[in-house]
Amino acid sequence: MKNKNEFEFKYVAPTATERKEIESIRNSYSAKAPASSTKLERLRKLDSIVKNVPVAFSLATGVFGLLLFGLGLAMVLEWNLLAWGIVVACIGCVPMFLAYPIHIKIFKSLKEKHSEEILKLSDELLGEENGK
């Protein structure tokens, strides 16, 4: 039987993958991260903005149109409001049809807006100064 005044301590060191994860979490909260990782993070963030913002806007537009279209169908099938249901369903078709052109327009404008900085950051990270 152990004495009540004794203390037992067991230490387990983190594995290499756990250490990398811990360091990445720590770096995200530190005031000053390493320069190379901030450039890479900035590049990832810009790429994410260019790709994900148009998808979000086009999905929101398409879902809004789909909900209006569904409301129009419900008006026709459940509430027997034929004329108003057709009008609402047709109005709902407009945003659904515009979702893809909205995606393309926003994607092109964001790509044009951020392309210079993305190319500059990628060149710096690859060690190329002239872009060739």
Image (cartoon, rainbow, N blue to C red):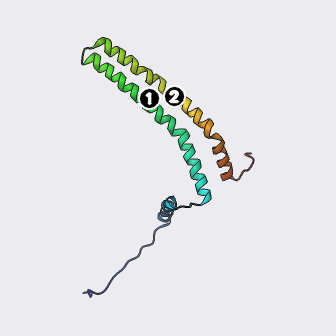
Residue 11 percent across, percent down from the top left: 41, 76
Residue 131 percent across, percent down from the top left: 72, 45
Q: Please give the name of the residue rendered at 62% of the width and 57% of the height, measured from the top-left corner.
A: 36
Residue 13 appears in which quarter of the rendering? Answer: bottom left
Under tag 1, what secondary structure?
helix
In terms of depth relative to the viewer, which is nearer, 90 or 17? 90
Under tag 2, what secondary structure?
helix
In the rendered image of this protein, does residue 91 appear above or below residue 53?
A: above
Residue 80 appears in which quarter of the rendering? Answer: top left
In terms of depth relative to the viewer, which is nearer, 38 or 16? 38
Q: Please give the name of the residue rendered at 49% of the width and 35% of the height, measured from the top-left corner.
A: 55
Q: Please give the name of the residue rendered at 53% of the width and 41% of the height, measured from the top-left corner.
A: 49
Chain-order first, disc 2 or disc 1: 1
For the image shown, how many numbered marks are present on the structure? 2
Residue wearing tag 1: 61
In terms of depth relative to the viewer, which is nearer, 90 or 22? 90
- Judge the density around disc 1: few (<14), some (14-19), many (≥20) Cα neighbours within 10 Å: many
- The span from disc 2 to disc 1 (Cα, nearest Å) is 8 Å
In the rendered image of this protein, does residue 14 appear above or below residue 76?
A: below
Furthest-front residue in this view: 31
- Judge the density around disc 2: few (<14), some (14-19), many (≥20) Cα neighbours within 10 Å: some
Give me the disc on residue 102. 2
Q: Amino acid at mark 1?
A: Thr
Q: Quadrant of the C terminus?
A: top right
Q: Quadrant of the N terminus?
A: bottom left
Residue 34 percent across, percent down from the top left: 59, 60
Q: Amino acid at mark 2?
A: Ile
Q: Are marks 2 and 1 in contact (CB under 8 Å)?
A: yes
